Each structure stands twice: as structure tokens, then as C-alpha cells.
Amino acid sequence: MRRALNLAVLVPAAALALLAGCNNSSPSDTGGTATTPAAQTSAASTITPETITAASQKSLAGTVHMVAKVDAAGQSLNIDGDVNPSTNDLSMKMTGALPMDMLVTGQDVYIKSSLFGVDKWLHVDINKLKATSALRQSMDFRSNLGALAGVTEVKETSPGSYEGTVDLNKAAAQSNSPTVKQSMEKLVKDAGVNATNVPFTAKIDSEGRLTDFTYTVKTSSAGEIKTATTMSDFGKPVTVTKPAAGEVVEAPAQVYDAL
């Protein structure tokens, strides 16, 4: 357990927040105020921050395959997951700085990692997690796109491709998700004055769905943190099967304390 905790500290809280998840979340909520989805347009003059936000909401309206990569402090964290918001099902694999497999179904979380020193799935009851739990925060898939609530400027660089700036202070203030708000506030504190002018790029497909979102934040603790998220396989079935009973052990109290 000690080894796992030490390695986890090396991954910024912002990275932990990018674990795709689906517990206690609304599929139309990306952490900001609700907007009406807008159709993709090639007229740069009509592109607004709401265009990007609406596209992200449409992407998260149903099942989706998410891939996220976080580069920080000379390390990389890769996250590959499938989410079904309507059934609270998640299947995710992490590689790189924090190797781990995670399954979420309803209020049950199953985690498997060599960092825990056991070759079985640890069962975690979501209801037993602290309100400030990093794991609870990480299971809110809206955190992947939480920064979009703070888009201040955007322009179309080519059909379906965009770039602009994000104010993370605005993203934190406008978030109506406690877990997204928490992750944004942590990132704001670490970024300092850099939080007000964060560059991003995005892509929207022909159906008006956000498919790519990348942003880079300069922080005091980890230097530049680059986060890149892609979404695909919209609407494809996502099901999660609990591990066999013989492959599961209950997480001990110290795991809950650590998470």
C-alpha cells in the first residue's frame, strides 16, 4: 500500500479527476450551466463558447468510449474507458504512472492493481467513501470536460476544428457538480495566474458531438499539465460484469482512508 500511495502522489489531482466515471452524475452536465445543443457550423462568426459546451453535452448524452492522456512532471497517465451513464456502468483501464483496472456498476467499485500488493479485485462501496475522496471525484466522468465551462474565446481553424482559451476560475464558479467543482478549484490553486488564460483545441463531428478536447495548464507543482481527451463509439452498448466472487476481496479500512 505504501508504494501505491507514494506513486499516486506523483500524479496531480487534476489527472486523478480525469478518470472516466459515471456515479451520481447527469449525462447532460459537463460541470457548467446547461445550454441548448447547437448544430455544427462552418461560419466562424457564429462560433461561441456555448457551441463547444453544447457539443460536449451531446457527446455525454449516452454511452461513449473515452480515452484520456495526461502528461505531467515527466510522467504520463493513460486512461481508456467505456461509460454507460444511464446504468452507472463503467469499465476502465489505466496505464503509465498509475496502472490500474476499474469496474463500476451501481454503487460498487472493483479495483485491480499490482500497486495494492494483491492479485484480486478490491471491492469498494461508494457509499463508504469520504465526501472529499479522490476516488469519488475521479468517478465523475464530467471532470474530463469540466474546463469547458470556462471557455472565454473560441474560433474555428478549419471545418469542425476549434481553438481558444479557458478561464479555470470561471469553470469552477459555473460548475454545478461538486466533484467537478472540486477538481477545478484544485487546478486553479495550482495554476495561479495561469488559470485565467488556458489554451485549448477541440473537434466537433458532423452530428454536433465533441470528439476531441486538449488543454495545457502551467502549474507550480508539476510544470505543464497537458490533458487530451477523445470520445467515440457513441451509442454502442456498454455492459459491466462483476468479477467472480472468488476473485474479489473487500477493501480494508486503510484503502478507504487512502482513497
Image: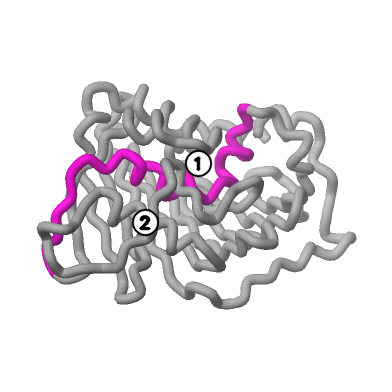
The structure residue drawn at horizontal position 26% and vertical position 34%, both measured from the top left corner, is: 167
Please provide percent x and percent y for residue 98: 52, 47
Which of the labelled discs sits on residue 16, or is there none? 1
Please provide percent x and percent y for residue 180: 49, 38
Q: Nearer the viewer, residue 132 or 32?
A: 32
Amino acid type at image mark 2: Ala
Mark 2 Cα-neighbour bin, 10 Å: few <14, some 14–19, many ≥20: many
Give the quadrant of residue 189. Answer: top left
The structure residue drawn at horizontal position 74% and vertical position 41%, both measured from the top left corner, is: 126
Task: Single out the mark in the foreground, 1 or 2.
Answer: 2
Residue occupying the far right of the picture: 246
Q: Is residue 60 visible?
A: yes
Q: Residue 133: within the magenta?
A: yes
Report whether 214 appears left or right of 180: left
Quadrant for the C terminus in the image: top right
Q: Nearer the viewer, residue 186 or 162?
A: 162
Q: Nearer the viewer, residue 241 or 175?
A: 175
For numbered disc 2, what is the local secondary structure?
helix
The structure residue drawn at horizontal position 30% and vertical position 76%, both measured from the top left corner, is: 206
Please provide percent x and percent y for residue 157: 11, 62
Q: What is the magenta range?
A: 132-158
Amino acid type at image mark 1: Leu
Quadrant for the N terminus in the image: top right
Which of the labelled discs sits on residue 162, or is there none? none
- Residue that badge 2 annotates: 54
Q: Is residue 12 visible?
A: no
The residues tagged by marks 1 and 2 sit, at their Cα atoms, a distance apart of: 25 Å
Check the image and tell me how it is coloured: one colour
